[in-house]
């Protein structure tokens, strides 16, 4: 059995019948190269953008460059863009 882990994605629809189905997903860009990320958190330290934390239903804030939650797999960080990034060149 092969399992394909697709991160930063949401299921849009599932078609077909038992044993023969097709899943349509929407994959969001990570904006940080997963193969180069060491999960050090330096990007979070310098990120100027603060957003509501969706992990705890917006009860706290987080930086736009972050992990969705501490035990996230893979451990690479991602950037959630809300608009044009203020840190762009």
Image: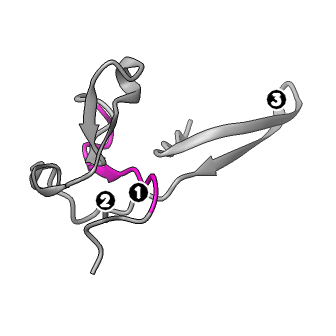
Q: Label for residue 34?
A: 2
Residue 62, position as x, y percentages in the image: 26, 36
Front: mark 2 or 1: 1
Quarter in which the N terminus is drawn:
top right
User: What is the magenta range?
Assistant: 72-83
Q: CA distance from mark 2 to mark 1?
A: 8 Å
CB under 8 Å between discs 2 and 1: yes
The secondary element bearing badge 1 is classed as: loop
Mark closer to the chain start, 2 or 3? 3
Q: Main secondary structure of the magenta part?
A: loop
Between 61 and 70, the residue placed more toward the observer is 61
Q: Residues within 10 Å of mark 3 (few under 14, many from 20)?
A: few
With respect to residue 18, does 10 lie above or below? below
Q: Residues within 10 Å of mark 2 (few under 14, many from 20)?
A: some
Quarter in which the C terminus is drawn:
bottom left
Q: Residue at x 22, y 29 (%)?
A: 70
The secondary element bearing badge 3 is classed as: loop
Mark closer to the chain start, 1 or 3? 3
Q: Is residue 80 magenta?
A: yes
Front: mark 2 or 3: 2
With respect to residue 10, does 89 lie above or below? below
Between 83 and 1, the residue placed more toward the observer is 83
Q: Residue at x 46, y 45 (%)?
A: 7
The residue singled out by tag 1 in the image is 30
The residue singled out by tag 3 in the image is 19
Residue 76, position as x, y percentages in the image: 26, 49
Q: CA distance from mark 1 to mark 3?
A: 32 Å
Q: Residues within 10 Å of mark 1 (few under 14, many from 20)?
A: some
Between 83 and 67, the residue placed more toward the observer is 83
The secondary element bearing badge 2 is classed as: loop
Give the number of callouts: 3
């Amino acid at each position: 059995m092969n399992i394909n882990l697709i991160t930063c994605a949401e299921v849009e629809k599932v078609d077909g019948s038992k044993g023969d189905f097709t899943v349509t997903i929407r994959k969001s860009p990570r904006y940080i190269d997963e193969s180069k990320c060491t999960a050090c958190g330096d990007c979070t330290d310098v990120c100027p953008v603060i957003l509501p934390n969706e992990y705890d239903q917006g009860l706290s804030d987080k930086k736009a460059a972050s992990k969705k939650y501490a035990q996230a797999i893979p451990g690479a960080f991602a950037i959630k863009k809300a608009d044009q990034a203020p840190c762009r060149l």
